[in-house]
Amino acid sequence: MGSNESSVSEQQQIRLQKLQELRSMGINPYPYEFDATHSSKQILNNEGLVKEDDQDETEAEQVAIAGRIMTRRIMGKSTFFNLQDANGEIQVYIRRDDVGKENYNTVFKKLTDIGDIVGIKGHVFITGTGETTVYAKEFELLSKTLRPIPIPKEVEEDGETKVYDAFSDKEQRYRQRYLDLVVNPDVRKTFQQRSEMVQAMRNFMNDREYLEVETPILQPIYGGASARPFVTHHNSLDMKLYLRIANELYLKRLIVGGYEGVYEFSKDFRNEGLSRFHNPEFTQVELYVAYKDYNWMMDFVEQMVENVAQTMHSSASVQVGDNEIDFSRPWPRIPMFEAIEEATGHDLYQKNLSTLKEAAHELGVELEGSAGKAKIIDEIFGECVEPNLIQPTFITDYPIEMSPLAKKHRTKDGLVERFECVCNGKEIANAFSELNDPQDQRQRFEAQAQLRSEGDEEAMTIDEDFLRALEYGMPPTAGLGIGIDRLAMIMTDSDSIRDVLFFPQMKPE
């Protein structure tokens, strides 16, 4: 056992002894409730406080507040400490003469540690240095911690402030997110911003009277995207089931059923590798609107994402790393093959398989042996074009081989009416004029089945019930999927998808 592990173990033993001593005193170290009346934010924002030259406590604001002790400055018969709740930190002042000798000397000073959760009742005052503070008249231990929390220490060395003992190891923070949230307030802010982003999108769609729905996560046939699924088994039915890779085909069934606008914030699962932009469990919102096409949907996406930026940042511009990303409308709209030719010098439109492979080889793009035309074009775009698109850009008009669920382009042979929105070097949205011709859809599914037989494990399967639904008639429809995690990375200036997931997938310790 390393010295650090040994030290932690010794500290745990000390805290266990304190726990037993509390119980021997008849104190429950884990009581059932505490009736807090205020948060730190409410107290700090309160204007009607007693001023430092008017300390009559009968006129002061009476409060009850609960949270975690983060720092302590013990000065004999009194102590200042910082208490952290969900909204931030506030200073607390506690005196032996106010809370009682045993409660102060034994319970608070001796048996309470940094990290413990406590409840305080008292009044609010302003210290001589101008700091809003809670003057404790009652103190109660609400949860005794058995492990010490890491507390960063700032030390002046050679004229510079250096930080020690910070909980900064990325992998450790992802594995112990609960501790990360305690000691790194900016992490809590990131997830609050993510929630604000989702709510802004939900409000935008609700204002247009689109219906939020739920569709199955366990599916007998997976579809709606090109990806490998996770497989499970239903014991009672004795049948194989799949975690959904997308909810597209179910939402389209609802359009068939007569709804004209439906959306879902969905957890989807794809059996793929981990990266800065990929987690096997992720969130996206999918929206389907009847009687619209992909041109209408581009306008919609511009409006919604610009609205999200304005809601979160009071500006259409968002700082992401070294880049300032401007979501102001309109965004550039560039056909896919034009974007590839501009970036590489290769015109790949309607080229055969051997020509595509030769272009990939010249560009240094590695391919799997079974890669078909769609896969090759996608790989070339992904390596040579996508990383250079920093400002939000619509890439339009994809080859039909890449888009088995999209309607054929009305004027361009071999293409479909599809766009992806690329921003900060990665796709954040994908949309179609949805294919509603059941015979064409069957042929596309059969072409996908042929790709599967040739070794493409991400090709789609044939969904007979979805084809049957289309045969009952689906109106012209525009469909959209937006990656919530990737958009959250941009809106919160986060470097990795793991920074915007509470509990990202990790290799076993």
Image: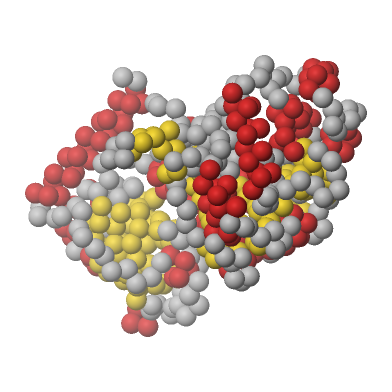
Q: Is residue 83 visible?
A: yes
Residue 318 is left or right of residue 245, and the answer is right
Find residue 150 and report its image quarter.
top left
Q: Is residue 175 visible?
A: no
Residue closest to the eye, 253 or 366: 253
Q: Is residue 185 above or below residue 124?
A: above
Q: Position of residue 139 (x, y in %)?
A: 25, 62
What percent of the width, then of the height, locates residue 12? Answer: 25, 36
Q: Nearer the viewer, residue 335 or 305?
A: 335
Residue furthest bottom as drawn: 59
Quadrant (top left/top right/bottom left/bottom right) for the C terminus: top left
Relative image position of residue 187 (x, y in whole percent): 51, 48
Q: How many marks?
A: 0
Q: Residue at x 78, y 22 (%)?
A: 353
Q: Is residue 313 left or right of residue 115?
A: right
Residue name at image x 77 percent, y 54 percent: 326
The residue nearer to you, when weighing 279 against 333, is 333
The percent coordinates of residue 78 (x first, y second) are 30, 59
- Residue drawn at (45%, 43%) of the image: 219
Q: Nearer the viewer, residue 107 or 431?
A: 431
Is residue 459 placed above or below 304 in the rendered structure?
above
Which quarter of the figure has residue 364?
Answer: top right
Residue 178, located in which quarter of the rendered image? top left
Quadrant the N terminus occupies: top left
Q: Give the image's coloring scheme.
A: secondary structure
- Residue 507 lies, with reference to residue 62, above or below; the image says above
For the point 27% across and 35% down, the residue is: 11
